[in-house]
Image (cartoon, helix red, strand yellow):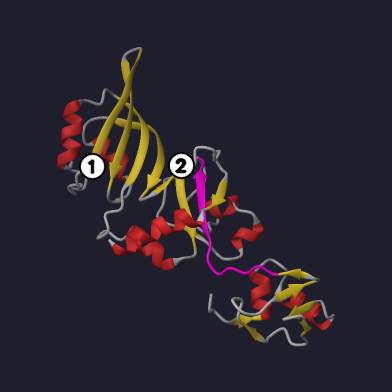
Amino acid sequence: MSEKLRVDKLLAHAGYGTRSEIKKAVKQGRVLVNEQKIKDSGIIVNPAVDIVAFDGEIVSYRSVIYIMLNKPQGVISATEDGRERTVIDLLDPEDVLLKPFPVGRLDKDTTGLLLLTNDGQLAHELLSPKKHVDKTYEACVLGKVTVEDQLAFEQGVTLDDGYVTRPAKLTILSHEEREDDVISWIRLTITEGKFHQVKRMFQSVGKKVLTLNRISMGSLELDPALALGHYRELTDEEVELLKQHRAK
């Protein structure tokens, strides 16, 4: 990392307190840069070269964060909202410091994989219509999903506003008889992200999505060990695989 920044900003981002608290700590001699006490919290350091310590603890600094969240129902894909609980509210305070935001959105009642990051360039690449990044969902659908539906999805279906979707891959996992209805369990891969797209695609063939869960986005697959409402940071390998979308 070659980014240079003020000591107080570095420490604040790393969770060591507010700017004023850090300024006070500096005056108290609790902050060292390259084993030397500093007197000015505004001095510039390079985290890739300079060693910063707070109360004897070496400070580990990073400027970007990549989070895999298994989004539960009832929260919205936003950074803030005056009335609703957001996905940011699910994060620990130290993980909010770098201001991650959701890459794309899942509906309030949709669960599953949601990437949060402050890497704006990566987010742009993953969401760019030109990239056609795969998004795979598993859903419970009211009605019997048929081979005819599969063929229709492969060709693209017309939504309620006249938009014709790009070709999508629909896999029928199973059917279940329930009184007068049939429930279908399916997997669907789309390469775009129109508003309520999966639900509207099934509406176009006369069926209704009851539950929807995203299991992958591009090369990133939802960790099966991650419970609803829980999250973890991406591994270096997962980040590198995602970044390969930039080259496509």
Mark 1 — residue? 168
* Label 1: which secondary element: loop
Residue 130, image x, y percentages = 24, 60
Residue 205, image x, y percentages = 21, 32
Kind of residue at badge 2? Gly
Quadrant of image for the C terminus:
bottom left
Q: Residue drawn at (34%, 58%), measured in percent from left and top? A: 127
Relative height, residue 127 to residue 184 (above, below) = below
Front residue (pair 219, 11): 219
- Left or right: 162 in relation to 88: left
Relative height, residue 120 to residue 34 (above, below) = above
Q: Residue drawn at (68%, 86%), measured in percent from left and top? A: 42
Residue with the most extreme right position: 28
- The residues colored magenta run 59-72
Q: Residue drawn at (76%, 72%), measured in percent from left and top? A: 54
Kind of residue at badge 1? Ala
Front residue (pair 115, 224): 224
Mark 2 — residue? 112
